[in-house]
Amino acid sequence: MSSLLAILSEQYPGRKDQASQLLSLLGEPTDPTPPFIFIYGPSATGKTSVIRSLFTHYDQSGQRYAYINGVECFTPRLLFERVLNAWAGHVPSLDNKFANYTRCENTVEFVNNVHDLLHDKQGQTHYIIIDQAERLRDRGPMLLTMLLRLSELTNASICTVLVSNVVWDKFRPRHGGALEPTLVFFSNYTKQQILSIIEKDCPKDEPPKFFLTFVDAIYEVFHRNCVDLDELRHLVTMLYPKFVQPVYEKQANRSEFTRLFKLCQPYFSAASERLYLREISTSEWQKYSTEVTTETAPEDVTQSIYQMAESGDGLDLPYYTKFLLIAAFLASYNPSRLDAQYFSRGKTQAKRRAKAVAQDATGGKDRQQLLGPKSFNIERMLAIFYSIIVEPVDSSVDVQIQIASLVTLRLLTKTSAGDRLDGIKCKCNVSLETIRTIAHSVRFEIDRYLYNFA
């Protein structure tokens, strides 16, 4: 165990305490273990990486643990069959016509199959590891309870490990019956831990000390708005080639860190507003960066990046997703009291819109674009979406998934509490120029629907 702890501590800086706690809970293969371990913490804190690496070394045969992704196994049947395949050492392939170990439709069949499979393996503990386990809350009220009490139901030594960003209080079934977990918390990384992790990404031909100095500067610039380790690593990967470019062009030395930082400053500004928000893709950023030299004026660099992000190719979204983003912009900047005037359908639609336009002329000093985006209910955005789109929405289009994609791309920012399932509120996170470009690409005259805009 000590050697495995040393490997994990070296591989994952700042996670020695969590790895030590997990190893003490697992013990030797024949030791009794808790029936339920709950691993939780913010995103990008190493939960998945540590747990997968730990079990890969802990059970090299791979037949005593089943790693399940809660997103991939979106039905109980998929979850059951993945677990049985892993414990039985069965791999679907061409030889067996990609068949599973056995067909398992419901919880009763799963319990019986587990009992039969582990009947001759009573001396060892088997593990079910479910990542993104918050998805289990949508799979029925009894699934979670059954998984947590699987050891009792099968009379076998089984430990269920749940990995999630959500605290246990949001999981606990209302009907009771669930075991209380052994908690393992993964806290946010400190600055020194983040630097130690990103230092491992240093290119082979670059001095580690020089690279670490750059990483430290990136952290100081972005950490107030970006605490996600994965995003910081992404920014370092994209910005470091531009930072070191003047050295290879013999326009500066590595010792002139202040000069290098000043030359790279326009890229920092553009990255904070465009690259981080994914308004331009990584490939577009890299393609554009190869065309710019350090002799280019800083204002030209920033302006060109902005223009590329706001061009038709900058936001390559599906057709209906563009209308959803337009509806979000309208809901975020237009007062809700004017929705009937702008978006109602019927003979009086043009008259009502003309009245609203007339009000725009006397809108006052506080124009909407100066006040910034306001929060809106998802229901209101959907009402605007179905009003502005001309043709009926195809039944195969899942609007909710497209809304979730906009949130993931940070084009929408969620402002309501994360655990709320109704009355979700968001606000739009794109500029007027960008939304005009998107509207133009779908031939939608957005200026006719904007209230009090110059």
Image (cartoon, rainbow, N blue to C red):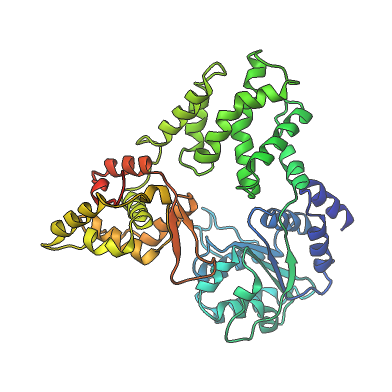
x, y percentage for residue 180?
Answer: 71, 79
x, y percentage for residue 10?
Answer: 81, 46
Query: Residue 296 or 98: which is nearer the viewer?
Result: 296
Q: Residue at x 69, y 57 (%)?
A: 47
* Total tally of numbered discs in the picture: 0
* Left or right of 427, for residue 255: right
Q: Residue furthest top?
A: 250
Query: Residue 239 or 329: which is nearer the viewer?
Result: 329
x, y percentage for residue 190?
Answer: 75, 50
* Left or right of 387, for residue 292: right
Q: Residue furthest right?
A: 2
* Residue 20 placement: quadrant: bottom right
Q: Residue furthest left?
A: 347
* Residue 168 placement: quadrant: bottom right
The answer to whether residue 201 shows anywhere in this view is no
Which quarter of the rendered picture does the C terminus lie within? Answer: top left
Q: Residue at x 49, y 69 (%)?
A: 75
x, y percentage for residue 55?
Answer: 74, 58
Q: Residue at x 35, y 48 (%)?
A: 318
* Left or right of 295, for residue 67: right
Q: Is residue 292 above or below residue 45?
A: above
* Residue 205 placement: quadrant: top right
Query: Residue 89 or 377: which is nearer the viewer?
Result: 377
Q: Is residue 163 above or below residue 306?
A: below
Which quarter of the rendered picture does the N terminus lie within? Answer: bottom right
Q: Residue at x 69, y 53 (%)?
A: 49
The answer to whether residue 23 shows anywhere in this view is yes
